[in-house]
């Protein structure tokens, strides 16, 4: 029996962070501290010169400590306002506060850009001695990475100007997406015969309804409603891409993937090897899609069928109460690691999760790190589906990763998105694999297995479509603006290719309904998910082989994610080469085995 408090809260606790929500006086006082901290950093940076001796580097110890502290405070503020705007898209005060936080972060980034330049101007000999000093060694990787990136950028003055202009330009366009989503409203006739207006998040949950007629009805309206907002979305996406392309051009970067690859601390060879292994395995996933269509009694699956629950005979898709989902997750996490289970219990008991299904919430799910208080908050809309339970486990995996790093220096907690997705998808793996193994009936086992395969399809096909779309969009954007209709055509073409033509309908407006294309903090918010999924597949295979002792090795791997490149991480902890397809084929094979089991169990059905 777990130590979960009952009932498990459906709403998160933000009052313990800053009481009063967007009217919080404590939060305004916190912003004042950030402002003061930024000013002090700016004043110090105006007087410095690059150290020419090892002794002179000591003068920067206080600055580096303060820089991390102010970044932590600004991160705390950013996470808080993102929670406010997610829980209520109509909270205009929160949107105003977001602008203030963005302004502080831009100034901080400008200070960091100057520090990058100082590191670049420091001789190799002095810099080597600097990062070897006992006080600095824990963040040596971060400082070296910062120095190397500075070599690829503009002068500090120009980089500072870019960051300043980006507040109302680049980031402003990204925030405009929230305004677009807030205007989304889809009329839906509920089980009582009443017409209700669904938010984007609520409507998205209906796309996973076990009743195909409900899915098809909502999906048709879903496309129609996004089409109405298409011109606004096209303006936004075009401006975001235009800003990036102009900046890349000024920096002398030819490849639009340079920034996302650098951000994810991985090489193009690793990315290509991963997609190669996936593409080789796609035929078996097409067989799965064909079999699922047969089991649903249709010739081909439509877009809204791909992630829909499979109902077999009298075994329908259960509406899983939130409290039961929490109990299940804690139980299965405990089968791998008591430490992970204890953490999940703490997260639920401390009301770190916002899961209530209500109007006005932003669509999607996320985990955000409160870097100063060393806590996390998880956001989602829980509708009782198996997919929702997986999402909850996924976000708790993110939270556990942050928990393991919370006592490290801030610069060593800065792990990339691809390895962040490793921890989250590994948590999903724990949950789904244990559920399949413990299923009470053949029907339940099949449904749980199909849920696992669904996720593989999402990573191998859906996200591949996003990657193909975004790569091609950026190439076309170099020639000029694209209309909403052109973006939809490009999206549908990418989906058809990624799904090998296996569907009879697609989602042309996916480029607008998916938040990830509008996130300014991380370009190409797609392939890191697939990397994380496959990397976790490979890790999970080793966990199964080694048993309980692997949990400590897993923690050690996660603890290194903020201080080495992914190729080095894999070599150190798994003894594999990520730049060749072998590891990726092995990792894809874990998912292929699920498909083959599913196909075997459904023969003749």
Image (spheres, helix red, strand yellow):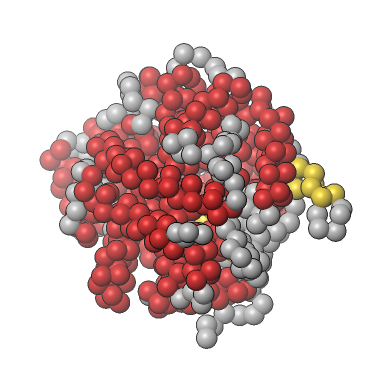
Q: Is residue 485 left or right of residue 150?
A: right
Spot the residue most to the top. 479
Identify the residue shown where x is 55% and y is 54%. 295
Identify the residue shown where x is 57% and y is 58%. 310
Q: Is residue 385 visible?
A: yes
Quarter assignment of residue 97: top right
Total labels: the figure holds 0
Identify the residue shown where x is 62% and y is 35%. 177
Near-viewer residue (141 or 601): 601
Near-viewer residue (217 or 418): 217
How far across and down, in percent of the image, does residue 193 sit? 86, 54
Identify the residue shown where x is 22% and y is 39%. 51
Q: Is residue 265 left or right of residue 516?
A: left
Q: Is residue 527 left or right of residue 289?
A: left
Q: Is residue 89 left or right of residue 308?
A: right
Q: Is residue 522 visible?
A: no
Rendered position, 332 above or below 475: below
Quarter assignment of residue 535: bottom left
Spot the residue most to the bottom. 1
């Amino acid at each position: 029996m777990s130590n979960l408090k009952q009932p498990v809260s459906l709403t998160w606790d933000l009052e313990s962070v800053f009481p009063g929500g967007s009217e919080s006086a404590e939060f305004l006082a916190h912003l004042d501290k950030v402002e003061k901290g930024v000013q002090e950093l700016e004043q110090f940076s105006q007087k410095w010169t690059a150290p020419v001796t090892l002794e002179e580097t000591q003068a920067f110890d206080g600055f580096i400590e303060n820089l991390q502290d102010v970044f932590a405070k600004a991160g705390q503020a950013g996470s808080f306002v993102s929670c406010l705007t997610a829980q209520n898209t109509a909270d205009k005060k929160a949107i105003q506060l977001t602008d203030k936080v963005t302004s502080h972060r831009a100034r901080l980034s400008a200070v960091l850009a100057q520090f990058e330049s100082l590191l670049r101007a420091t001789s190799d000999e002095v810099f080597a001695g600097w990062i070897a000093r006992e006080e600095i060694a824990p963040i040596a990787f971060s400082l070296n990475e910062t120095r190397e990136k500075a070599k690829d950028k503009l002068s500090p003055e120009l980089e500072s100007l870019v960051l300043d202009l980006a507040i109302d330009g680049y980031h402003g366009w990204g925030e405009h997406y929230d305004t677009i989503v807030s205007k989304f409203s889809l009329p839906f006739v509920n089980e009582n015969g009443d017409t209700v207006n669904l938010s984007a998040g609520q409507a998205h949950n209906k796309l996973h309804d076990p009743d195909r007629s409900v899915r098809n009805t909502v999906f048709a309206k879903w496309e129609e409603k996004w089409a109405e907002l298409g011109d606004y979305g096209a303006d936004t996406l075009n401006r975001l891409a235009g800003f990036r392309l102009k900046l890349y051009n000024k920096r002398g970067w030819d490849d639009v993937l340079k920034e996302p690859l650098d951000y994810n601390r991985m090489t193009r060879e690793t990315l290509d090897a991963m997609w190669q292994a996936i593409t080789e395995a796609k035929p078996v996933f097409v067989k799965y899609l064909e079999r699922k269509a047969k089991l649903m009694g249709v010739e081909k699956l439509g877009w809204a069928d791909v992630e829909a629950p499979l109902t077999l005979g009298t075994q329908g898709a259960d509406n899983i109460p939130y409290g039961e989902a929490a109990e299940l997750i804690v139980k299965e996490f405990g089968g791998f690691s008591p430490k992970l289970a204890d953490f999940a219990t703490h997260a639920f008991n401390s009301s770190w999760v916002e899961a209530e299904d209500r109007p006005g919430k932003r669509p999607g799910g996320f985990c955000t790190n409160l870097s100063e208080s060393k806590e996390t908050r998880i956001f989602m809309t829980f509708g009782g589906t198996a997919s929702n339970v997986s999402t909850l486990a996924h976000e708790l995996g993110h939270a556990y990763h942050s928990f393991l790093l919370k006592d490290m220096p801030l610069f060593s907690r800065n792990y990339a998105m691809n390895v962040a997705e490793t921890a989250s998808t590994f948590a999903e793996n724990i949950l789904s694999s244990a559920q399949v193994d413990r299923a009470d009936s053949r029907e339940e086992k099949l449904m749980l297995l199909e849920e696992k395969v669904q996720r593989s399809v999402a990573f191998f096909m859906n996200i591949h479509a996003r990657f193909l779309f975004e790569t091609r969009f950026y190439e076309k954007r170099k020639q000029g603006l694209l209309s909403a209709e052109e973006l939809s055509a490009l999206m549908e073409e990418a989906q058809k290719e990624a799904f090998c033509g296996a569907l009879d309908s697609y989602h042309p407006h996916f480029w607008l309904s998916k938040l990830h294309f509008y996130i300014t903090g991380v370009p190409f918010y797609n392939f890191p998910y697939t990397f994380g999924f496959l990397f976790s597949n490979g890790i999970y295979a080793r966990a199964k082989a080694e048993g309980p002792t692997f949990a400590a090795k897993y923690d050690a791997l996660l603890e290194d994610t903020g201080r080495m490149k992914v190729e080095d991480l894999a070599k150190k902890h798994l003894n594999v080469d990520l730049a060749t397809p072998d590891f990726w084929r092995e990792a894809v094979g874990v998912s292929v085995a699920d498909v083959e089991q599913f196909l075997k169990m459904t023969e003749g059905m």
